[in-house]
Image (cartoon, rainbow, N blue to C red):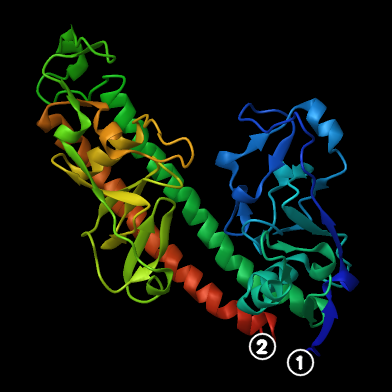
Amino acid sequence: MSTWTKQKLGDIADVKGGKRLPQGYFVGDEKTLFPYIRVTDMVSGRVALDVMKYISAEAQRQVSRYTISDRDIYISIAGTIGLVGKIPAQLDGANLTENAAKITAIQKNSDRDFILYYLGSRVGQFQIKQRIGGSTQPKLALNRIETIEIPTPDLSTQTRIASVLSAYDDLIENNDRRIKILEEMAQRLYREWFVKFNFPRSTRSGQADHEKVRLIDSGTEYGKIPEGWEVKRLDSEIELAYGKALKEDDRILGNVSVCGSGGIVGTHNEKLASGPGIVVGRKGNAGAVSWVDSNFWVIDTAYFVKTKLNLVFTYYLLKTQNFVLGDAAVPGLNREQAYRNSILVPPIDLIYRYAHKAEPLRELIGKIKIKNSNLSKTRDLLIPQLVTGRREVK
């Protein structure tokens, strides 16, 4: 059995900060050779590639020393403090925000992933929270990160523990990729049918439906649309119902998902709406459209959707909407303004033909999410036991 000791993080690795962009330089959506990793990109121990921002070559020259390697660990030190994770190989050498630090130059007798799992565990997060300073603007100082005590068995034991836990993460990541592919399939099908007007082939004639439907001028921003389709106000078919406030202390018990503008933020023992359902961000991540598989409670930063149309069709319709946000001081989605949006409503039989294809995709997504939830719970139960030596790894 391995002997466990404790070492300070600063004794087995270096801790170095990121860098703020100089005045006059900004991140942007245009893809360059220089990605810039922000705290908002740090999700579930990884970096969210789909929202990545970039900087210019000139800006990168100003901060060229403040990069992170795919062999390092990131840790957020301001804003949302204590997020830890690693970056993918394609972001090796990316620049790092001043609101995060990197744990780098990890000694050869220490396993990077073992350290990462410890820092992300309940015991590791407790140590991180103990070291947060500042009252008006809390921050985690680099020299305090160095004092975090890491339990250290021999390297082979660290590696075996990291391997066991990585297996769960690999399964979760593979499932996430499957979910993304299924989402893209349903959304691409929606756009093909209801944006490009390429309908499925008729079972009777073998002719494409869009080849026999006459296009007429709608007199709206949609231009020419298929005959028999209607342009309507959003509120003629869809209601954005207000969520209800729920104290944070009441979001921790129960089996009903609590949803806000950014997704699920906890659980509760009462439901506000029956699932599956749709949530639209009102404040915070305003205008974001989310699907919820089970019964749910919506807090007051979001709306929940009531629709006269098929639910799956409504979900993908709303995802194509360009919601204009109002209230410049605190950007949000005003319901009356959203209701003035125009939506294109096809004949009901075509909506249900779409639903017949898209609903099985959503059901499969729901099943995969349940698998991932179970994998995450098992992994999270194992992490504190394995990284502290309370449970021996075989």
Q: Position of residue 334 (x, y in %)?
A: 33, 38
Q: Circle 1 sits in a helix, a strand or a loop, which is it?
A: loop
Q: Earlier in the sequence, mark 2 or mark 1?
A: 1
Disc 1 crowd, CA 10 A, few/some/many (<14, 14-19, 20+): few
Q: In which quadrant of the rendered image does the N terminus lie? A: bottom right
Q: Is residue 228 above or below residue 263?
A: above
Residue under label 1, please give it: 1
Name the amino acid, label 2: Glu
Whether residue 278 sits left or right of residue 173 in the image: it is left
| CB under 8 Å between discs 2 and 1 | yes
Disc 2 crowd, CA 10 A, few/some/many (<14, 14-19, 20+): few
Residue 294 visible in the snapshot: no
* Residue found 40% across the figure and 42% down from its top: 288
Name the amino acid, label 1: Met
* Residue in front for this viewpoint, 70 or 13: 13
Q: In which quadrant of the rendered image does the C terminus lie? A: bottom right
* Residue found 36% across the figure and 53% down from its top: 365
Residue under label 2, please give it: 392
Count of all numbered marks drawn on residues in the image? 2
* Residue found 50% across the figure and 75% down from its top: 378
